[in-house]
Amino acid sequence: MKLAGVAGWPVEHSRSPALHGYWLKEYKIEGAYVPLPISPDHLPDALHLLPKIGFAGLNLTIPHKETAFRICTELGVIDPDVLKIGAVNTLVFDSGRIVKAFNTDGYGFIQNLKAGAPNWNPEKTNVVLLGAGGAARGIIVALLEAGVTSIRLLNRTKEKALQLSKIFPNTTVGDWKKPAESLANADLLINATSLGMKGGQPLEMSLDELPKSAIVTDIVYTPLQTELLKNAAARGNPVVDGLGMLLHQAAPGFEEWFGVKPQVTPGLRKCVLGG
Ligand code: ATR
């Protein structure tokens, strides 16, 4: 029986066990995917032991992505594409050790966008990206790989956006407090901050200057229809919600551990939303 799981602290809110559990059942695979509440202090020991006790691999969620990146860098198992992201969310184990470490968040983001906006042409896209944290980094790498024209970064702490623009080509920095001038030229607006999440602070941004043809997407998926997406849809912009990013980012790990390339289907979406 194959075994994988998600390590987080806390981890009880993770939807990953439901998601992978759905696929295991769907593809009739003898396996299990379990939530693992592992404190930051115990992460190094856990990453040493889990491969030895038969796990095929692991997903990492908050707050472990950066620590795991450092550990995997020392072990020399980081996928080269991930070096600029500084965070990993998927590990593959073999013969009692970690053999691969990658980050599938950006992949999940792009797949979700392609599914939700089938006419999207990355090569004719000026992006406005809100945020400069770990999630934003993964998305920038994936957008550049997809060939977007430019990325304008807006972040509350401007310094963090400036640092990213030094690392990544075709990126410029705008003013978080004066978004209008950046939005006027956007073909794709992405919220990669935590603003708008249920129970948290709202994202208050006027979309008046945003062209009505611009696609608007949000990495926040609780609620599924964030205020940003509601406002954008009300003025006629195409919108793509963030749940698909979660679903798509899970697929590469599942394939590595359980040997089947899983599909993101309406049934999966319903199952993950339902729990
Ligand atoms: P993640 O890994 O999910 O990206 P993170 O690295 O903590 O998490 O980044 C959170 C992002 O949300 C950052 O861009 C953060 O802005 P700062 O760099 O200024 O901290 C943004 N964010 C969080 N709370 C915010 C708030 N109240 N107003 C504006 N931006 C906020």
Image: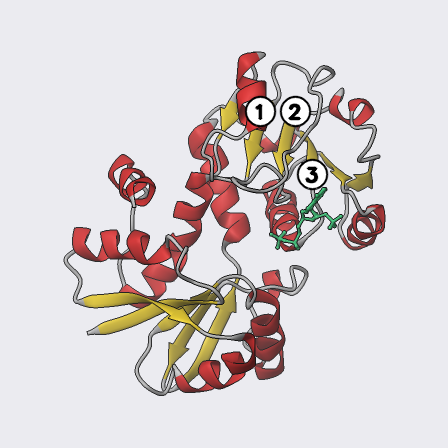
Q: Which residue is at the front of the view, 40 or 199?
A: 199
Q: Work out whether mark 1 precedes mark 2 in sequence or the reverse, and give the earlier one.
A: 2
Closest to the camera, between mark 3 and mark 1, is: 3
Residue 109 appears in the figure: yes
Dot label at residue 215: 1
Which residue is label 2 attached to? 187
- Quarter where residue 195 is shown: top right
| Circle 3 crowding by C-alpha within 10 Å: few under 14, some 14–19, many from 20 | many
- Tell us which disc is closer to us: 2 or 3: 3
**Amino acid on which the number 2 mark rests in the picture:** Asp
Q: Secondary structure at mark 3?
A: strand
Ligand 1: does it lie within 8 Å of the C-beta at label 3? yes
Q: Which residue is mark 3?
A: 130
Q: Which residue is depicted at the point 39% across and 46% down?
A: 247
Q: Which mark is residue 144?
A: none
Q: Callout 2: 10 Å neighbours few (<14), some, many (20+)?
A: many
Q: Which residue lies at the image location 48% right of the left edge and 38% below the top edge? A: 242
The three-letter code of the residue at mark 1 reads Ile
Marks 3 and 1, how far apart at CA: 14 Å
Image marks 1 and 2: residues in contact by CB distance under 8 Å: yes
